[in-house]
């Protein structure tokens, strides 16, 4: 990572430069894809301002910290950058996982290989009206339709459930549990 430090209206001391380098390099523990960073230090009368700009693939973050001394201003700005980068990392992690825990449906509910669609494409959209009903009435309704499963609200548990055909005379039940 390349770090540029600009000092406005002050002399940049080696101690201050090392301090900024340590603070900005700590940001890499939150997000290791930082391409470059820039720190702009400004002193105006009694205001000490530290601005940190971090560029990552696809995003640029800019934070500013203002305090009575320059070290505190750098601390504030570095803390804000750490928050931005940790949020970005968690978003990318959630996006990669789609933010949900995916449970596999029983094999009877999965599409056969010859009718499988490409990942990310939807070949059909259906809407289901979920009505509270007992398991026996849901099985009766499932037998009256050609689909391999039926979604309903289980009267006993008050949760969304799915009943599916499992062989010729057997049925399976999936109960949704919301943590």
Image (cartoon, helix red, strand yellow):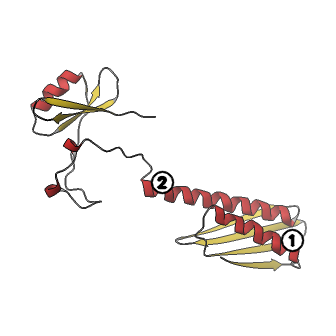
**Residue 35 falls in which quadrant of the image?**
bottom right
**Which residue bears the numbered disc 1?**
44
Left or right of 140 on screen, residue 99: right
Q: Position of residue 104 (x, y in %)?
A: 31, 45
Q: Position of residue 169 (x, y in %)?
A: 11, 29
Q: Is 60 located above or below residue 103 in the figure? A: below
Left or right of 25 on screen, residue 12: right
Label 1 CA crowd tier, 10 Å (few <14, some 14–19, many 20+): few
**Residue 36 falls in which quadrant of the image?**
bottom right
Q: Between marks 1 and 2, how big is the CA–CA gap?
A: 42 Å
Q: Are the residues at dot 1 and dot 2 in contact (C-beta closer than 8 Å)? A: no
Q: Secondary structure at mark 1?
A: strand
The quarter of the rendered structure image containing the N terminus is bottom right
Label located before the other in sequence (1 or 2): 1
Give residue 149's mark. Answer: none
Q: Secondary structure at mark 2?
A: helix
Determine the residue positioned at 80% across, 67% down: 49
**Which residue bears the numbered disc 2?**
94
Q: Is 147 located above or below residue 57 in the figure? A: above
Determine the residue positioned at 16% across, 35% down: 165
Determine the residue positioned at 61% across, 61% down: 85
**Residue 97 falls in which quadrant of the image?**
bottom left
Q: Is 45 located above or below residue 106 in the figure? A: below
Left or right of 96 on screen, residue 50: right
Please tell me which residue lies in front, 166 or 118.
Answer: 166
Determine the residue positioned at 77% across, 63% down: 65
Label 2 CA crowd tier, 10 Å (few <14, some 14–19, many 20+): few
Please tell me which residue lies in front, 40 or 160.
Answer: 160
């Amino acid at each position: 990572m390349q770090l540029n430090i600009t000092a406005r209206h002050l002399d940049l001391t080696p101690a201050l430069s090392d301090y900024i380098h340590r603070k900005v390099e700590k940001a890499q523990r939150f997000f290791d894809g930082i391409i470059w960073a820039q720190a702009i230090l400004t002193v105006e009368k009694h205001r000490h301002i530290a601005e940190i700009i971090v560029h990552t693939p696809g995003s640029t973050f800019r934070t500013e910290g203002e305090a009575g001394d320059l070290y505190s201003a750098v601390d504030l700005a570095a803390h804000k950058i750490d928050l931005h980068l940790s949020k970005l990392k968690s978003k990318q992690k959630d996006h990669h996982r789609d933010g949900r825990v995916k449970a596999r449906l029983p094999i009877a509910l999965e599409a056969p290989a010859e009718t499988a669609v490409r990942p990310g494409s939807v070949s059909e959209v259906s809407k289901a009206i979920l009505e509270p009903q007992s398991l026996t009435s849901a099985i009766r309704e499932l037998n009256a339709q050609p689909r391999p499963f039926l979604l309903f609200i289980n009267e006993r548990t008050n949760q969304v459930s799915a009943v599916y055909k499992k062989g010729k005379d057997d049925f399976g039940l999936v109960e949704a549990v919301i943590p």
